Amino acid sequence: MSELVTGEAVALELRPARLPSRALAVLLDLLVAGAVYLIVTVAMIAATASLDEAARMALSIATFLLVLVGGPIAVETLSHGRSLGKMACGLRVVRDDGGPIRFRHALVRGAIGVIEILMTFGVIACIASLVSARGRRLGDVFAGTLVVRERIPAAPTAFVPPPPPWLAGRFSALDLSAVPDGLWLAIRQYLTRMQQLDPQVGQDMAQRLAADLASRTGAPVPVGVPPAMYLAAVLHERRTREARRAFGQGPAAEGAVGGSGAPSGAPGFSVPQSPFAPPEPSPASPQSASAPSQPSAASPSSYPAGARSGSSAHGSGGHPGTSASGTGRTEPPSTGFVPPA
């Protein structure tokens, strides 16, 4: 990877082409140019049969310069640094600042290429490319150009595990404006690689990242929430907000399910170690366990079992004022208030 700096002081990361790919591209270009030169030479011999020897020699030199020197220069100028061989190998000639080359760059490269490629059979070009840190031959050095790779294999997208369902939307009121981009990047890298880390090292890293994130947001880590799940939930909330700002409410709702980088239908947040496991649900209170679980007379199947059993741990009990046995007797609601008779 090579870092180029443009005229606007923007750093570009480009992959310089190495000797094998460049040699293959030059070989393909020479084969095409040689075939064209052979066809043009045969046509010139047939057309200049009546001329003297000096005229035929002059036409031969002109044909050589026009086809083997002028041809590559014209092709690189018109295609902005992509000859046929370079297009086949996924290469391109650019300036030192990453911009497209012009005629003067192609002219210098072609003129020096006659010496270091054609006259020496590529020996000088190979030596210069091996010595150069960015694989440049002499023509590139004098012209101020660089041959880079255009076709770069795409890296596999890292999978960021989504938070568990019981943490979805829990941090919707959290202030994330003070969290720097570097911390977000560190959290994302940890979540994508935590399965590859040593359990103790990964747990310590998650605790440090969670403490740093909590100090930036001004809210402590909730009790009972493992640090890794806390990081995943907050990162998921940030992506949901970005999707809402970019696309509106509709895509944000969809991003709330798959916005954490998880594919559709992916399993929930799973980690191998027990410290990362979700906390066990609190047992039901004795009153709710001892209350009779008779269905309401209004709708026997429209409420879950916990809601039909009276008062639950979340306060979603049966309807106050309805009779449990159907006799019309009013039961006291969960607040303890008894309506007058």
Image (cartoon, rainbow, N blue to C red):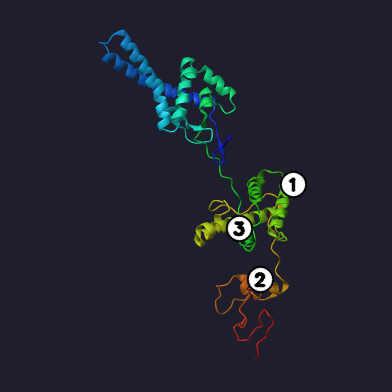
Q: Quadrant of residue 3?
A: top right
**Of the image marks 2 and 1, the number of the one nearer the N terminus:** 1
Q: For mark 3, give the secondary structure.
A: helix
Three-letter amino acid code of the residue under disc 2: His
Pointers 2 and 3 in contact (C-beta within 8 Å): no
Q: Name the image quarter holding residue 298.
A: bottom right
The nearer-to-camera label among 2 and 1 is: 1
The Cα–Cα distance between marks 1 and 3, rounded to whole angstroms, is 27 Å
| Residue with the mark numbered 1 | 200
Choose between 107 and 337: the one closer to the eye. Answer: 107
> Residue 285, image x and y in percent?
71, 71
Q: In this view, does 23 lie to the left or right of 224?
A: left
User: Which amino acid lies under the numbered mark 3 shown in the image of this protein?
Assistant: Glu
Crowding at mark 2 (Cα within 10 Å: few <14, some 14-19, many 20+): few
Measuring from the top left, give residue 174's x and y in whole percent. Answer: 65, 61
Quadrant where the C terminus sits is bottom right
CA separation in Å, label 2 and label 3: 24 Å
* Residue assigned mark 2: 314
**Can you identify the residue that label 3 sits on?**
237
